[in-house]
Image (cartoon, rainbow, N blue to C red):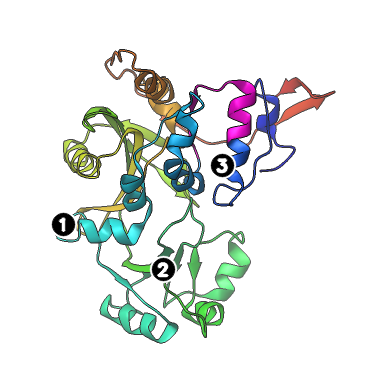
């Protein structure tokens, strides 16, 4: 959506498009498809998915396929309230409530043991950590102010009250706080049968504002079983990611389903499961060969730079 970003210099062609949820996003994308004779779109951003799923046929008329699940599957997977409601009788769903105003929120928080226990609020539909907050009844705001960067997800009830009081709140969900480790399961699903072809489990290591650091591939049959059940029950297609976090008792609870490529696809690809390429092969109707996962890989995020001169990369570090 911005005119000048690092990715602009790493690709063969670059276009600025409107936000994925805007009314003119699809028209802009169709113009690019026609001009460049695009055969396949591989979506990466949550806020684009519903719009693309709704308009799949318009792209197919131009000879372009989209590596994306069908709209009804996207609608449920992307919406945490609908997702939790669909599986609410299962042990892997965290305790949750909806609320319409601040007073109702306070009432529901007490059912989760607040202020002795932390609670979490987040939008029904979001991307990364947008709108996500951990409400801590014991937070020391002064210590947070002097010791932490202004990127913490933790917030006091008093500050939250200033933000949402006197507003109608109809698109947020309240959940219990899960204190254990976070995990991700990346799955490749056949777009015709909606059955899992292959999948990997990832220990997300240290997670900051949804960014995975010190993550690694692990073996965990229980997480594989739960993730496979969820993905096939939703009838998802291509590559999807399901995130989990353990509660205080070590039970795995579903955080969210991302019906798109995860940001950590590089880890799976390095281990021999090239999820972007395999998704494209499935979309083209090509045979998919699955290799055995190899290596003891870990993934870290780090700060890097590229040096540009006359719109060309001359150095990077």
Quadrant of res 57: top left
**Residue numbers of the magenta segment:** 30-44
In this rendering, the label closer to the viewer, 2 or 1: 2
Which class describes the residues within 10 Å of circle 2: few (<14), some (14-19), or many (20+)?
Answer: some
**Tag shown at residue 263:** none
166 and 213: which one is in front? 166
| Upstream in sequence: badge 2 or badge 1 | 1
Could you tell me which quadrant the N terminus lies in?
top right
Provide the secondary structure element on which disc 3 rests: helix
Q: Position of residue 268 (x, y in %)?
A: 38, 26
Q: Which numbered disc, 1 or 3, marks the residue that appears first in the sequence? A: 3
Q: Is residue 3 visible?
A: yes
The residue that appears at 30% across and 15% down in the rendered structure is 288
Alpha carbons under labels 3 and 2: distance apart: 27 Å
Q: Are marks 1 and 3 in contact (CB under 8 Å)?
A: no
The residues tagged by marks 2 and 1 sit, at their Cα atoms, a distance apart of 22 Å
Location of the C terminus (image quadrant): top right
In the displayed structure, 102 sits above or below 195; it is below
Q: Nearer the viewer, mark 3 or mark 2?
A: 3
For label 3, the crowd category at 10 Å Cα-Cα, with few meaning under 14, some 14 to 19 and many 20 or more, is: many
Q: Is residue 7 left or right of residue 184?
A: right
146 relative to 139 in the view: left or right: right
The tag earlier along the polypeptide, 3 or 2, is: 3
Q: Say which residue appears at 17% left-offset and 35% top-offset.
A: 221
Q: Report the residue marked by disc 3.
A: 26
SS type, badge 2? strand
Can you identify the residue that label 1 sits on? 91
Residue under pointer 2? 172
Mark 1 → mark 3, Cα distance in angstroms: 39 Å
The percent position of residue 297, horizontal first and vertical second, equals: 39, 25
Please say whether residue 31 is one of the residues in the magenta stretch.
yes
Give SS at disc 1: loop
């Amino acid at each position: 959506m911005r005119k000048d970003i690092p990715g602009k210099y790493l690709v063969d062609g670059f276009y600025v498009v409107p936000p994925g949820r805007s009314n003119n996003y699809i028209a802009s994308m169709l113009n690019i498809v026609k001009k460049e004779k695009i055969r396949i779109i591989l979506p990466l951003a949550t806020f684009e998915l519903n719009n693309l799923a709704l308009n799949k046929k318009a792209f197919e008329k131009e000879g372009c396929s989209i590596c994306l699940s069908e709209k009804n599957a996207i609608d449920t997977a992307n919406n945490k309230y609908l997702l939790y409601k669909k599986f609410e009788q299962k042990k892997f769903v965290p305790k949750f409530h909806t609320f319409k105003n601040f007073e109702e929120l306070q009432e529901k928080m007490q059912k989760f043991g607040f202020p002795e226990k932390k609670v979490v609020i987040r939008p029904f539909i979001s991307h990364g950590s947008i709108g996500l907050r951990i409400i801590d009844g014991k937070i020391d705001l002064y210590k947070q102010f002097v010791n932490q960067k202004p990127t913490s997800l933790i917030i006091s009830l008093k500050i939250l009250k200033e933000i949402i009081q006197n507003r109608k709140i109809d698109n947020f969900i309240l959940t219990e706080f899960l204190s254990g480790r976070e995990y991700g399961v990346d799955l490749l699903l056949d777009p015709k049968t909606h059955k899992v072809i292959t999948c990997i489990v990832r220990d997300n290591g240290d997670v900051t504002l949804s960014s995975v650091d010190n993550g690694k591939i692990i073996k965990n049959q229980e997480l594989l079983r739960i993730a496979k059940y969820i993905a096939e029950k939703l009838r998802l297609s291509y590559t999807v990611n399901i995130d989990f976090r353990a509660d205080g008792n070590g039970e795995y609870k579903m955080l969210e389903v991302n019906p798109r490529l995860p940001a950590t696809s590089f880890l799976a690809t390095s281990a021999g499961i090239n999820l972007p390429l395999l998704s494209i092969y499935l979309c083209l109707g090509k045979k998919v060969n699955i290799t055995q996962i190899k290596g003891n890989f870990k993934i870290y995020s780090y700060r890097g730079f590229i040096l540009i001169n006359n719109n060309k990369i001359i150095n990077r570090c």
